[in-house]
Image (cartoon, coloured by chain):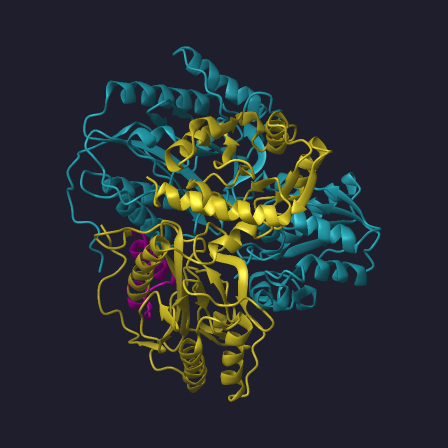
Chain colours: A cyan, B yellow
């Protein structure tokens, strides 16, 4: 079931250990499921309980510790030796009395790591305040330090195989967008569009299917197009409304996000104006991106393009994207915003999302791109204009089997 | 857009403040998105950035603090006064330099809470180790204490309106299961089944659509039925295989999980045996459940039923369920397992999941139930036997517009 050659995982471990050495870390405790997957292949919906991948500066293999019922998932989805897979008893799950980190601390103690310099992912969802307290309590002689984003930084430049998965994810994003857009017409409901998007995002093509994306499709509608992170309701679409669709295709946990804006019937002058400003801005940005620029430089192109129209935008223009699990497909490393000094390199991948949100309207037209040797290329191919739908349902939907 | 009367939210706040007083907490910082929703109505996919609901023992209204671009979502989805909705600038998002908790600490300081007794959800996904460190650093005179599961405990007994949403979610679970099961035949792929499940779970009925569930459909297949938390791949189903489907219908963020096991073609003797043991066990448990029993008592019924067959099961039999967000639909309060002293009360809701997992096979047949005045009732109605599918595709699938 491994999506990459073992040698690719080994190379990632090697790069991680090099960074650990630089940071003075003996032992790295990975709780970010994307980082766990990246280094070991581990892939299961088990991150709602505490689990961890341990990287020892002296070992070429990680150690997995998690709930006993997920240990078989570690056996079938990773390249690790079975001896390195350790399950904790079920009584540790969601218990007032026992915490999985106490069990894990005991594992570390048995390995002789009670006084190690230990790196932890301090600001990750799946490393709670309590998890850290429990570890510190059980290992009072260990020296803990932040290893936030250490592995995430290794993830930024993608390999050929990773890019192949992202291209497949791009195709899934196109399919989901195309079929979802068809349902955005008077009389259909927001949930009908979301259902159709999901269907195509996952059934995919005859050659490959899709994974679940780390964020669900976002579908702000009407005045709520000013509110980017709303999902969907069972309200019916109305003629004259705008709808934003932000979704991602996902292949082997690699994401290609794509956002478009749809007008149901003839668009308002306001929507035409702001969508053309967004399109002009992203076109300019895509024309200019090349290796050697900083993320801050890229944002400046967008900011200048907006300034011509008298608009200032507070939110960042984009972020590094790729492998991930809920609740976010962003890698949390580089952001395309003023002051970000990250230098673009070939095979970095970004979601460029020039969203413009005003009091009662908004527009999003985004692309996921790969930085090439000389510029950039988009990973999904989809017309970049405002989409204008006939308001009438032109074919039968919602009557699947 | 509010799914409940304002008075229902006010009652929840009142119960929460009563518990705060009992625990000696002046100020409760809520980071669990389900608890945020429960108390305020807040509903958006924004929990991938730091955000918070502040409950003051002296105020009847909460305060929302989050990313500036999500403040409009707080305005449209909650019952709160606009003055209580505070956004932090985008530069705090995924930044090495600035942490949202520093901003939030400043909000607390301005409110005069710098020396308050502050309750925090120590073991929640969306309260990271770093978040706690930043708060402590910025508010050295505050006295922090754990308020883990304080609001979750208020959530355990459901109101009539909550149960109405759960009954609708139950109907969505039935629809998704029925249509998903139809696709589990030789030649179709796991992703085709997942896509069909998603379609029906979200498009729902003509009267109501569905929300995204907090856990994606789980589809362990063949030998992997021994591994409960695998999702799906694009591998084709084979005749003779077993498939476990675990999914949930979700309405207004309320979940009704449902698991069934499907044989593709005639089932093996082993599968017939373990599925009948599971069915017998859950039937017995559902017959016995009534208010006044403890969760431990309920588990004992299941354990005795298994013992007759010489089987011991380590994992818990179930857990409290209802309102939630990814990554889990469980409420993390009561678990149906040995020693859990939670006393069943009418209108508590549980997912009872007698999973049996062996070396190379497994079975899951689950029900979500409401405790009634005299017993219990299931919230989805679906035949509880092993499902035996003809291996051949009997209708056209996967060709949806």
Q: Residue at x 49, y 36 (%)?
A: B62
Viewer-closest of A244 and A157: A244
Q: Quadrant of the C terminus of chain A?
A: bottom left
Q: Indicate the position of residue A347 as horizontal and vertical percent values.
A: 54, 36
Q: Is residue B273 magenta?
A: no
List x then y, in percent, for residue B232.
43, 60
Main secondary structure found in the magenta portion:
helix
Counting from the top left corner in percent of width and height, residue B363 is at: 45, 75
Left or right: where does residue A269 sit relative to residue B72?
left
Q: Residue at 23% across / 25% down in the picture?
A: A267
Is residue B293 something that shows in the picture?
yes
Q: Is B287 above or below relative to A47?
A: below
Question: B126 left or right of A98?
Answer: left
State left or right for residue A334 relative to residue A288: right
Q: How many marks?
A: 0
Is B196 colored magenta in this rendering?
A: yes
Q: Nearer the viewer, residue B148 or A248?
A: B148
Q: Using the image, determine if residue A239 lies above or below residue B207.
A: above
Magenta residue span: B179-202
On the image, which quarter does residue A223 sit in? top left
Tell me where residue A326 appears, x and y as whole percent. 50, 47
Q: Quadrant of residue B119?
A: top right
Determine if residue A148 is in view: no
Seen from the viewer's position, the closer of residues A85 and B233 is A85
């Amino acid at each position: 079931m491994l999506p990459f050659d073992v040698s690719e995982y080994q190379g990632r471990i090697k790069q991680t250990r090099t960074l650990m050495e630089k940071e003075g870390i003996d032992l790295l405790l990975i709780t970010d499921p994307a980082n766990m997957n990246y280094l070991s292949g581990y892939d299961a919906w088990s991150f709602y309980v505490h689990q961890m991948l341990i990287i020892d500066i002296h070992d070429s293999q990680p150690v997995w510790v998690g709930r006993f019922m997920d240990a078989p998932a570690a056996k079938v989805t990773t390249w690790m030796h079975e001896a390195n897979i350790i399950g904790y008893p079920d009584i540790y799950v969601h218990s007032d009395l026992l915490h999985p980190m106490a069990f894990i601390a005991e594992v570390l103690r048995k390995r002789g790591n009670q006084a190690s310099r230990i790196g932890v992912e301090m600001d990750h969802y799946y490393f709670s305040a309590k998890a850290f307290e429990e570890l510190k309590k059980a290992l009072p002689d260990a020296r803990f330090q932040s290893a936030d984003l250490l592995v995430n930084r290794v993830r930024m430049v993608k390999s050929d195989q990773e890019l192949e998965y992202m291209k497949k994810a791009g195709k899934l994003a196109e399919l989901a967008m195309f079929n979802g857009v068809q349902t955005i017409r008077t009389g259909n409901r927001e949930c009908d569009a979301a259902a159709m998007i999901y269907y195509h995002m996952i059934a995919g093509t005859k050659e490959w299917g899709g994974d679940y994306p780390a964020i669900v499709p976002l579908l702000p509608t009407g005045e709520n197009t000013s509110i980017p992170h709303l999902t969907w309701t069972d309200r019916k679409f109305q003629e004259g409304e705008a709808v934003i669709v932000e979704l991602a295709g996902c292949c082997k946990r690699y994401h290609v996000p794509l956002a478009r804006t749809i007008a149901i019937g003839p668009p308002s002058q306001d929507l035409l104006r702001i969508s053309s400003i967004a399109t002009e801005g992203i076109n300019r940005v895509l024309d200019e991106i090349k290796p050697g620029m900083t993320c801050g430089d890229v944002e400046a192109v967008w900011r200048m393009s907006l300034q011509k129209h008298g608009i200032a935008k507070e939110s960042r223009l984009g972020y590094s994207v790729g492998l991930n699990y809920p609740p976010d497909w962003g890698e949390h490393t580089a952001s395309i915003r003023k002051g970000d000094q990250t230098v673009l390199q070939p095979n970095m991948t970004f979601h460029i999302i020039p969203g413009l949100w005003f009091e009662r309207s908004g527009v999003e037209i985004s692309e996921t791109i790969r930085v090439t040797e000389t510029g950039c290329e988009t990973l999904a191919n989809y017309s970049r204009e405002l989409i204008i739908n006939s308001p009438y349902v032109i074919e039968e939907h919602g009557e699947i089997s």
